[in-house]
Amino acid sequence: MTKRISAALRILIAAISFIMLVWVNLNFVTAGTFIGTALFGAVFLIMLLWKPFCKLLKRIWRKHIGKILLILFGGIIAFCAVLCVVFSVNMAVCIEKPLDEPRAVIVLGCQVRGETPSSMLAYRLNAAREVLDEHPDAVCVVSGGQGNGEDISEAEAMRRYLIDNGIAGERILKEDKSVSTRENIRFSTEILSEMGITNGVVIVSNDFHQYRADIYARENGLSDIGHHSTRTPFHNLLNYWIREWAAIMAVRFEI
């Protein structure tokens, strides 16, 4: 009975790993693709080759240096797993945090195709409109420079989109020099600081992105930070979520 349960459990884990392996590869290639493929691919292969894997571990464990390496490797895996759980909890907490009276909205940039916002950027802009329509006194910083394949800056494409969708141009401040999330926040914060706004700021981005944005916002002296998120398409979510683990780890350990 115990062997049957063990075999059934391995089959279940293998099936889940295979599903996750497929899911993480549904998006275009990012760091999340490589990390997720390595992680779920390794688990799937271990479950598939369980007996040879156990024999290999026993052979390594018999040697003194093998014990040290296995303990060290196991400790690193456990530490990374705990970090990913902690990061995920913080990411979930930061997905939505409304403010009663926001003074400003920062919309984080994303890909522009030619002069047209990508679907993900359009989702962010529509989410920003929700806050701006509800709080007509709040200003909006659209943040993002010009990247490869973009005919104009992300900020300019965002400004045009918001104006075309009913947001007054005088409410929109353009930050068009940044090339990363950290610069998005830093340069946008500088613009708002010049206006005397250092609190009551709502950050608009995708759900997975908000925790790292919150870290950068606090680094740059913002307080009373709100978050309003747009959802990430389900087929993209795992890839981006795993990529974000790596990005947060790099921030926390200054890699």
Image (spheres, helix red, strand yellow):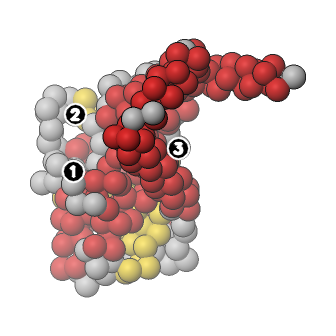
- Earlier sequence position, callout 3 versus callout 2: 2
Residue 115, numbered circle:
2
Q: Is residue 166 above or below residue 50?
A: below
Residue 106 lies left or right of residue 86; in this view the side is left
Residue 180, numbered circle:
1
Q: Residues within 10 Å of mark 1 (few under 14, many from 20)?
A: some
Camera sees residue 208: no
- Earlier sequence position, callout 1 versus callout 2: 2
User: Which residue is depicted at the point 42% across and 41% down?
Assistant: 67
Residue 219 lies left or right of residue 214; in this view the side is left
Q: Is residue 167 above or below residue 160?
A: below
Element on which disc 3 rests: loop
User: Which residue is depicted at the point 22% across and 79% down?
Assistant: 193
Residue 63 placed where, x, y %? Answer: 39, 35
Residue 7 placed where, x, y %? Answer: 73, 19
Residue type (three-letter) at the residue carrying disc 1: Ser
Q: Is residue 144 above or below residue 197?
A: above
Q: What residue does disc 3 label?
A: 231
* Marks 1,3: beta carbons within 8 A: no
Q: Residues within 10 Å of mark 3 (few under 14, many from 20)?
A: some
User: Which residue is depicted at the point 58% across and 19% down?
Assistant: 50
Residue type (three-letter) at the residue carrying disc 2: Glu
